[in-house]
Amino acid sequence: MKKTYPEPWKRGTTYHFTITEDGKRKNVSTGCAKKEDARGAVRKYVDLRAAGTAGTFRTYSAPYFIWESCPRVARRLEEGKSIGRTHVKQSRALLDRWVLTDPVFPVIPLREITRGHVLDLRRRLRERIAGINTVNKTIAAVKTVLSEAAFRGDIPADPGARVGNINYEQRERGVLEAAEVRGILAARPGDMDKNPLADAAMTLMFCTGCRVGELRALRWGALDVDTGRTLIREAFKSQREIGTTKWDKPRAIVLPQLALERLQTWREKSLCIGPEDFVLTVDGPAMGITWIKNIFNRVMDAAEADKELGFKRGDRWLTPHAARHTLNTALLAAEVSPLLVQSFLGWSSAESRVLGRIQRQYTHLELLDLGAVANAIDELYGGKEKAAKTRLG
């Protein structure tokens, strides 16, 4: 007799199906946006259930970390939670390269996987992979599959729970001295003086401490070039994918006068100055990550070659993200309130590390004097005469 399968039906952007298990009707998401893919997911689900098992780790993990078919992606999107395409793609690559090529783990029936199996996999990965960070990320991908399986009731318990990361000494991010930044922004090495776009990018990088994804996503409509008031509300998650800022928390800042002046110079030259146009663009699309890295490295190399600046990179690990760490360090050294610094830079749970629970309830960040941060940055990077000119609006 030919086996029949439930017909999937659409809810929102994904297909679901209804099945009776243990005498109860149950609605199950396929995680698929296309009906044919959903039918395949239904057949797989029913066949695995009929066999009395959720299959091996290899078969169960097949749709995971594939944007169109991943059950976890579909669930998070339905719940209004964010998840990056780049993270999903990278996790899939880790599973394919390191886990599914393991001689043992992929063929273990999902319901029989124990915490010991996960720990043994981690040990074998350490023997195969040079970087501990990659081992941790690979195990994290495995734990995600297992936790989702437990959450959906496909397995009775999560065998990946309480399996932690391997500790290792991370390379410390390099920072620059405030005087070094002041000299670089004044001298404009690496053709900053001839390229207003590069000049604006470098100045924004150091004067706002924005993450690279936030800088790339900054639009003219999000800032007031007269007062400097700016809303950091978007960020690139990958080369082309744009979403909300980290931790889904937009934040308001006030740009220092130094950054405003160079932005205005670039605005006069730019052909794309509409509210929805990106600030860092030439012909529409936002400048890429590689462009920003190249500009940063070119400026650092030129600064080091300029004997008058006396700048030496040494063994410091300097990347565009170092500008963020540099600003944080410089502002705290200048005795700017840690709450202001953390709010300006958009650190996670910034308030909780500074204020007590009762204080947090009665502190409204929008009323804090973020202009004071802009003044401090102008004094640090642009000289004291700049601070007096900053307009707070």
Image (cartoon, helix red, strand yellow):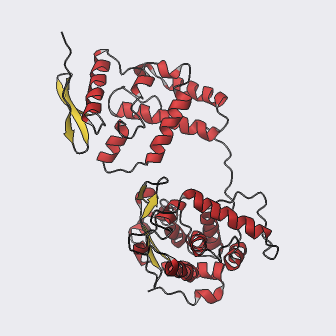
Q: Is residue 108 above or below residue 385?
A: above
Specify whether 78 is left or right of 385. left
**Residue closer to the observer: 41 or 168:** 41
Residue 317 at x, y percent in the picture? 70, 57
* Residue pictured at 37% horizontal, 42% vertical: 73
Tell me, yes or no, if residue 237 can be seen here: yes
Q: In which quarter of the image is the C terminus?
A: bottom left
Residue 55 at x, y percent in the picture? 38, 20
Specify whether 73 is left or right of 211. left
Residue 80 at x, y percent in the picture? 31, 51
Specify whether 222 is left or right of 123. left
**Residue closer to the observer: 288 or 364:** 288
Q: Is residue 131 above or below residue 186?
A: above
Q: Which residue lies furthest to the top in this view?
A: 1
* Residue pictured at 54% horizontal, 61% vertical: 212
Residue 215 at x, y percent in the picture? 51, 65
